[in-house]
Amino acid sequence: MSAPHSSSRRPPIPILSYHQTDMVPPRGTPHRELVLPPARFARQMRALARIGWRGLSMRDLEPYLRGEKVGKVVGITLDDGFLNNYHHALPVLRELGFTATSFVVSQQIGGHNEWDRPAGVEVKPLMDLQHLREWMDAGMEIGAHTRNHADLLTCSEAQAVDEIAGSRHELEALLQVQVRSFCFPYGRLRDEHVEIARAAGYATAATSDNWRVGADADLLRLPRISVWLSTPLPLLLAKVATGYEEWRHNPILRAMLGRKPVKTAALAHPPVREPIS
């Protein structure tokens, strides 16, 4: 899928995608790029606030996505419900008056990221019910991330419905709140999975496509800008505030520059790269 062109109805909206805020594991550790030092996350959030951006959860971002409001806003999302985000990200978000969405795997509340174990990733604790309630009490949002962090491309239609719709039902029953937001695990999905999410009643669903949200975007197939360990602050700000990612994915522009097309991210886990200090 190519990056959509934004119309004049509203400016493009960036949504940032994070995973963990924690001590960075040793070099060579699988998926090391998905762990951001807490101080770096704080520095990024404060830099956004300093230049006038307001971080919002997917719930709070909805009226901007629909064009009902206009402002200098950026979506903040954290996948998988890691406990380290409760400890490290939440205080910074509260300090700045930002809100954010934690996408939670409903069958692993209070558990661990067991889906990463086969890849050799060290498993980390996830938020339990009390943490999730305190996350919401602080003004943050809980979104759904399937029941078992399922790779939807390997699921039958019935399994996909159970994972997508079932996660919403489980979270709503446990938390006694409406769950409006969904995130496709690994960024892997087909058109029918978008329609399952729509039928399940979600207002928004996030992917791993790396560009800002254009005015004509399907709210059940929203791109996000992934923030890696190796993403320097100036580049992150450029991705948020300019058309950097749209230009990077524009096949016509890349052809003019003699560069190969950029493939849409099919995985939530990037290739390992060493961080830029």
Image (cartoon, helix red, strand yellow):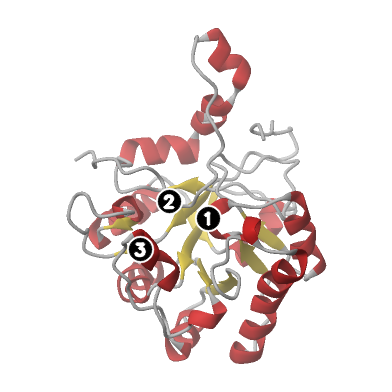
Q: Nearer the viewer, mark 2 or mark 3?
A: 2
Q: Residues within 10 Å of mark 1 (few under 14, many from 20)?
A: some
Disc number for residue 186? 1
Earlier residue among tags 3 and 1 = 3
Q: Position of residue 186 (x, y in %)?
A: 53, 55
Residue under the image location 36 percent in, 35 percent down: 235
Please determine whether, in this image, residue 57 is positioned above or below residue 235.
below
Residue under the image location 60 percent in, 49 percent down: 71
Residue in front for this viewpoint, 175 or 196: 196
Q: Position of residue 18 (x, y in %)?
A: 42, 57
Badge 2 marks a residue whose secondary structure is: loop
Badge 1 marks a residue whose secondary structure is: helix
Image quarter of residue 159: bottom right
Q: Position of residue 108 (x, y in %)?
A: 48, 80
Image quarter of residue 120: bottom left
Residue in front for this viewpoint, 258 or 66: 258
What's under tag 3, amino acid-wise?
Answer: Gln
User: Which residue is disc 3 drawn over?
Assistant: 20
User: Which residue is disc 2 drawn over?
Assistant: 269
